[in-house]
Amino acid sequence: MTISQIAALREQAGLTQRELALAVGVTETTIANWERGRSGLDWIERLIRLCRTLNCNLEDLIAEEVEAEPSEPTFEELRQMYREGRLSALSSSPVTPDAL
């Protein structure tokens, strides 16, 4: 989460740090720390209240921070990759596509 994202969303909502703090159930200092990136969002309930108060979703807050993790291929995807010659057998024994 970047420093400006929470502050910008708060300002768009027309809220002061104090108003946002009251709505979310934290102190003004916590809001200031969140806006400066000094501490994480500790409880998911508060994060949900923050999103509801700012009329945004979690992705709006962390879009630049989170990168999609590459997923592990499924067995079927591995089988298809092998059949297409994009994957070689890892064992010392010969493996045919029919064996997969």
Image (cartoon, grey):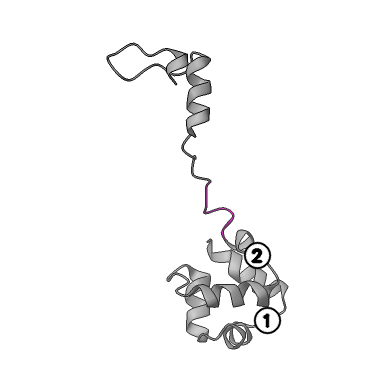
Viewer-nearest residue: 91 or 100: 100
Viewer-nearest residue: 3 or 76: 76
93 displayed left or right of 19: left
Residue 33 x, y percent position in the rendering: 47, 75
Span highlighted in magenta in the image:
62-67
In the image, farthest residue toward the left: 92
Would you say residue 30 sits in the magenta stretch? Answer: no
Q: Amino acid at mark 2?
A: Asn
Q: Secondary structure at mark 2?
A: loop
Residue 61 x, y percent position in the rendering: 59, 63
Indicate which disc residue 15 carries.
1
Residue at position x 44%, y 21% in the image: 100
Residue 72 x, y percent position in the rendering: 46, 37
Q: Amino acid at mark 1?
A: Leu
In the image, farthest residue toward the front: 98
Q: Which residue is mark 2?
A: 57
Q: Secondary structure at mark 1?
A: loop
Viewer-nearest residue: 63 or 70: 70
93 displayed left or right of 3: left
Residue 62 x, y percent position in the rendering: 56, 59
Image position of 44 with respect to 92: above or below = below
Q: Main secondary structure of the magenta part?
A: loop
